[in-house]
Amino acid sequence: MKIKRDFYLKKIIDKKDNGRIKIITGIRRCGKSFLLFNLYKEYLLSMGVKEEQIITIALDEIDNLEYRNPFRLNDYIKEKTKDKNEKYYIFIDEIQLSVAVKNPYIDSEEKNVSFIDVLLGLMKNNNLDIYVTGSNSKMLSSDVLTQFRDRGDEIHVNPLSFGEVCHLFENKDIALEHYIVYGGMPYIYSLKDDQEKNKYLKDLFQETYIKDVIERNNIKNDQEVLEILLDFIASAIGSLTNPSKLSRRFLSEKQIKIASNTISSYLSYFEQAFVIYKANRYDVKGSRYFSTPLKYYFADIGLRNARLNFRQVEETHLMENIIYNDLLRRGYNIDVGVVEHEIRKEETRAKVQLEVDFVINKGHQRYYIQSALSVDSMEKREQETASLKKIDDSFKKIVVVRKPIIPRHDKDGILYVGLEDFLLDENIINL
């Protein structure tokens, strides 16, 4: 079964032959390799590029272990691209598996040679167009892009969106129900049995994500802590938390004493592996950020559900996570909004903080979005829109509800849309 990824394919095509390294990032098993090695390769071939002009190497394959050495990788690519009159397209998969090695010409560890040196050298050849994939943001989004000095373009790939999978189902309602439970890891959609899907998602954590984090960060004897931490975050999506709060929870629930700084580090490792994302709190009226508490979301809702053995599939929080992921895919900067206002209690005044699920920005655009399971009653509607009504600027205010509804505005100009329409139509928020 072949799932189109036109959204990301277009991003790569738009950067073809631009003289920069294309760095395709994303959580492992989200479809980066398929996008590059299959879909983009098919596109190049359809445009007249010959098979021998496309040089591919996957560093996670056992046959290619030697090419994790940057010197061997450099030699391999140069051998394959000898003809200076020919244009070559270089695909390197899972580049973060390349290791830094000692420079044989300089006796100093600070002068280790890495894949960065290889790529910087190769990109000087005008007949090479280079693409790499990687699954760790610390290595690929920050360090590498900095060292490329604006000579690299990052294309971040997410697990499948609802829009990419809904056509696989005859009934869109069933499609959304499935997506809320199993999410968008591509291999899921080749499995027919629910038990197989459950096992696959659980195994991904054990054999891929947790293992990668432990090995990459040289963590000793703390796998249980990592497992528990993921479970805590999974059970608290949509809820405010911070490392100190999590540290206290470890002590009270598991009788494990662990410093908040250690928890903060471990959370950052899972962020770097694109397993989780964090959203900071933003004071809408004060135009300032709060350093704590904050919210965490999983890159894929199916992975989140698997962490909890599919026991806590409560749609309120899952909706919020799914909306967050789709906004991230669309390229918005996302914060959790806080609206402070004063209320009078008899002779005193008290400050109250109301929450806006998402404050999203892209360029000069801003939207305020609330996720609500239902707004069927007047009481529920007032509860979900209280924070939005306290915002006195002119930016769009939107409530996304679980069930299908006809999009409409209320007397305060707040737009109500159904979750399915929101996920399938990016322009619906501009109604």
Image (cartoon, grey):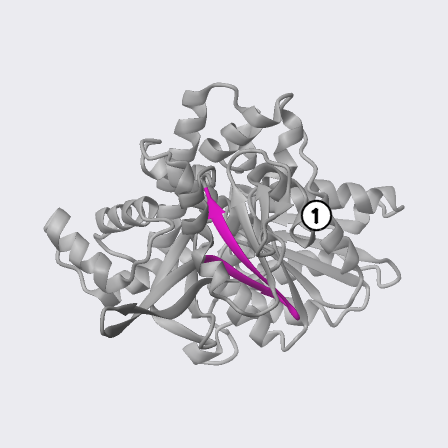
Give the x, y percent position of residue 63: 55, 42
Under mark 1, the amino acid is Phe
| 361 in the magenta segment | yes
Residue 286 placement: quadrant: bottom left
Q: Is 414 in front, or is 345?
A: 345
Give the x, y percent position of residue 192: 52, 19
Give the x, y percent position of residue 209: 40, 46
Residue at the location (19% across, 64% down)? 259
Residue 34 placement: quadrant: top right
Can you say which quadrant of the picture contains the N terminus?
A: top right
Q: Residues within 10 Å of mark 1 (few under 14, many from 20)?
A: few
Q: Is 374 in front, or is 114?
A: 374
- The residue tagged 1 is 7
Q: Main secondary structure of the magenta part?
A: strand
| 171 in the magenta segment | no
Tell me if residue 99 can be seen.
no
**Span colored in magenta:** 357-372
